[in-house]
């Protein structure tokens, strides 16, 4: 035991062993001190224990071509973390807003970072100087920047403007905008840069249409026009990732595959939701097929990021709901798909040992990937971002603030996990958001709350027969914004309030029994949701046409404000508004929904039968039960729609 008394008090002189031990202790103490300083420096002001440390929320990651540096977008820290090739922190680059997307220029000298906001910014970051050198204006909630092969053009998804912004990086000015489908959230260029494939998050059609699915927009980059739209299979929605193979022949799209056309009597074997990757033939611009990522008795919910290895032999997908990484043998899957016939030959008996005998069987085959995929359990929570550097896959955990390295050459691909920042206590709201996106609390992990309301607690564009009011009466999924402020819950008000609905959802949609603190945390998260400003506003204010619509809205002769009074834009009552359909019982009355954020919750009505707000206001309400709009002119309908969509 060290003697800390001075020599004057009889301390013996240190021998060589003491000196060596002291030197070793000093090195250890110095290393610990250096690590503390690094954590403090990377965490920014107020990062000391007890000083209100905030989560980091890694939302995107890219790797340098040589794999020697990694760049991670930290959404709630308004920063980019720069790491070395082993994942160790080097520095942090401050940003003017929360980063939502990240791309590395072809020459490796610059980062393009989208900072999402109603009026987003695209920041160009000089890597050598580690700072923002230019800011370009973008649209509402910019995401997923993509550099052209020559680095002269940047394509950006303006999610709520339903468009792709084209930015000229030489002049640092906008070069055009290309309208796409609904909520573009990811994009990828063909190998030669001639085509941009855009993943649209939600279906854009009425929910009672014969086919309801999200769409992939294909843009000719020379003409800047959509040249083709590819439909996912019915139920294909909540698209989040897209990637083109290194040889340019194929693209992979990650999405949910909902079985919304059956009553929700069970969740086993993907009865309600399955998780999928759709493969696209880029040359022919056609969907080859859709392959399920689940196992027969274990869901792989909420597929998100997708990437191909440099040799094209493996396709990687993260599962944000079950906290996993799928490593798929891509050539073998493509070969297996190609060998399946369109139809059995006349007189040919099906192979009863296989679920897929023809191509159309594949989207319902939970065993298709058996022997062709490894499913790796990650230690982090909410893997939303993925990057490849050589033979290493890097995955970030959105809720755990973690970085995980998976060696793809290892026989056992076990992740090596490190923290991107100091451990922090999770608030009730943050925990509720995490649970909302967590499918492991569902029986057999088939779905999370986000599987029907998206990861932001809004809508999925589908009708679900949730058995709240009996079998055979499907209702459109509702946004959960202000759900706790505007009781009752559900379209027909069958739940007294949102608290009751949350607990019923756990029992009857998740098919689980959970501790009381789980729904309590979900309540806190849902209560925290705030409406976003509408893209129909001009500089944050009503347009002239919307102002005229506001006067109509408030006019007693039209009557909208009678049932949708400000500030909640609902009177919390139920009515027969003439929208009852053939699947609804006689005397059915519908809860008056809030009109706040109506611009992002299409399709409308309880059955999703109105694709647009204009259809709501000019539909077949000949008795004027749903407001007195039959006497309005076409121009007045447009004005009224503009106001409602601005709320």
Image (spheres, rainbow, N blue to C red):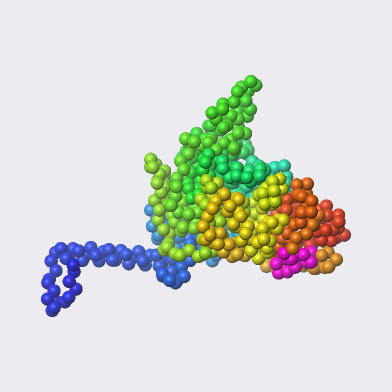
Q: Position of residue 216 (x, y in %)?
A: 63, 45
Q: Quadrant of the C terminus?
A: bottom right
Q: Position of residue 329 (x, y in %)?
A: 48, 37
Q: Nearer the viewer, residue 96 or 42?
A: 42
Residue lying at the far right of the rendered structure: 631
Q: Nearer the viewer, residue 125 or 555?
A: 555
For the question of whether residue 204 can be seen, the reply is no
Q: Quadrant of the N terminus?
A: bottom left
Q: Could you tell me which residue is drawn at 68 percent across and 63 percent down? A: 487
Q: Could you tell me which residue is drawn at 81 percent across and 61 percent down? A: 627
- Look at the image and say whether residue 630 sits in the magenta stretch: no
- Look at the image and say whether residue 563 sits in the magenta stretch: yes
Q: Quadrant of residue 472?
A: top right
Tell me: 35 left or right of 545.
left
**Is the residue 28 above or below the residue 212 in the image?**
below
Q: Position of residue 130 (x, y in %)?
A: 45, 62
Which residues are the magenta region?
560-572
**Is the residue 133 above or below the residue 9 in the image?**
above
């Amino acid at each position: 035991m060290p003697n800390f008394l001075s020599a004057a008090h009889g301390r013996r002189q240190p021998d060589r062993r003491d000196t060596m031990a002291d030197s070793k202790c000093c090195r250890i103490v110095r290393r610990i001190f250096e690590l503390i300083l690094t954590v403090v420096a990377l965490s920014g002001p107020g990062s000391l224990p007890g000083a209100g440390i905030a989560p980091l929320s890694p939302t995107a990651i890219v790797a340098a071509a040589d794999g020697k540096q990694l760049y991670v977008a930290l959404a709630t820290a308004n920063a980019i973390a720069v790491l070395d090739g082993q994942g160790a922190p080097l520095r942090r680059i401050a940003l003017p807003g929360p980063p939502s997307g990240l791309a590395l220029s072809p020459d490796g000298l610059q980062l393009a970072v989208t900072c999402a906001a109603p009026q987003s910014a695209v920041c160009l970051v000089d890597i050598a100087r580690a700072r923002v050198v230019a800011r370009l204006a973008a649209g509402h909630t910019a995401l997923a920047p993509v550099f052209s092969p020559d680095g002269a053009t940047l394509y950006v998804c303006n999610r709520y403007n339903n468009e792709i912004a084209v930015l000229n990086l030489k002049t640092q000015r906008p070069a055009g905008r290309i309208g796409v489908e609904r909520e573009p959230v990811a994009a990828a260029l063909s190998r030669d840069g001639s085509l941009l494939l855009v993943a649209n998050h939600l279906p854009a059609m009425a929910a009672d249409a014969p086919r309801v699915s999200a769409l992939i927009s294909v843009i000719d980059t020379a003409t800047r026009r959509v040249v083709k739209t590819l439909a996912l299979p019915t139920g294909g929605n909540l698209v989040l990732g897209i990637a083109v193979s290194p040889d340019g022949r194929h693209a992979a799209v990650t999405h949910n595959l909902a079985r919304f056309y059956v009553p929700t009597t069970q969740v086993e074997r993907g009865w309600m939701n399955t998780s999928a990757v759709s493969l696209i033939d880029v040359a022919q611009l056609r969907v080859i097929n859709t392959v399920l990522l689940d196992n027969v008795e274990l869901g792989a919910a909420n597929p998100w990021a997708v990437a191909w290895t440099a040799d094209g032999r493996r396709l990687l997908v993260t599962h944000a709901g079950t906290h996993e990484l799928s490593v798929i043998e891509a050539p073998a899957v493509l070969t297996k798909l190609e060998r399946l016939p369109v139809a059995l030959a006349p007189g040919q008996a099906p192979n009863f040992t296989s679920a897929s005998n023809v191509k159309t069987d594949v989207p319902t085959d939970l065993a298709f990937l058996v022997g062709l995929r490894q499913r790796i359990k990650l230690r982090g929570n909410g893997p939303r971002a993925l990057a490849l550097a050589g033979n290493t896959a890097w995955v970030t955990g959105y809720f755990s603030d973690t970085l995980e390295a998976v060696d793809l050459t290892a026989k056992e691909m076990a992740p090596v996990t490190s923290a991107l920042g100091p451990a922090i206590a999770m608030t009730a709201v943050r925990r509720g958001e995490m649970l909302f996106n967590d499918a492991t609390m569902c029986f057999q992990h088939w779905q999370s709350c986000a599987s029907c309301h998206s990861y932001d607690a809004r809508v999925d564009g589908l009708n679900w027969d949730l058995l709240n009011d009996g079998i055979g009466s499907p209702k459109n999924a509702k946004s959960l914004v202000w759900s706790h402020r505007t009781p009752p819950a559900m379209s027909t008000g069958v739940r007294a309030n949102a608290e009751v609905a949350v607990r019923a959802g756990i029992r009857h949609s998740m098919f689980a029994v959970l501790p009381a603190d789980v729904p309590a945390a979900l309540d806190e998260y849902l209560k925290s949701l705030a409406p976003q400003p509408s893209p129909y506003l001009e500089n944050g204010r009503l347009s002239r046409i919307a102002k005229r619509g506001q006067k109509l809205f408030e006019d007693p002769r039209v009557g909208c404000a009678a049932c949708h009074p400000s500030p909640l834009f609902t009177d919390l009552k139920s009515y027969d508004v003439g929208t009852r359909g053939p699947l609804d019982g006689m005397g059915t009355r519908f809860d008056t929904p809030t009109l706040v954020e109506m611009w992002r919750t299409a399709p409308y009505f309880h059955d999703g039968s109105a694709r647009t707000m204009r259809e709501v206001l000019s539909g077949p309400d000949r008795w004027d039960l749903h407001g007195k709009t039959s006497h309005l002119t076409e121009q007045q309908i447009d004005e009224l729609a503009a106001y409602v969509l601005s709320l």
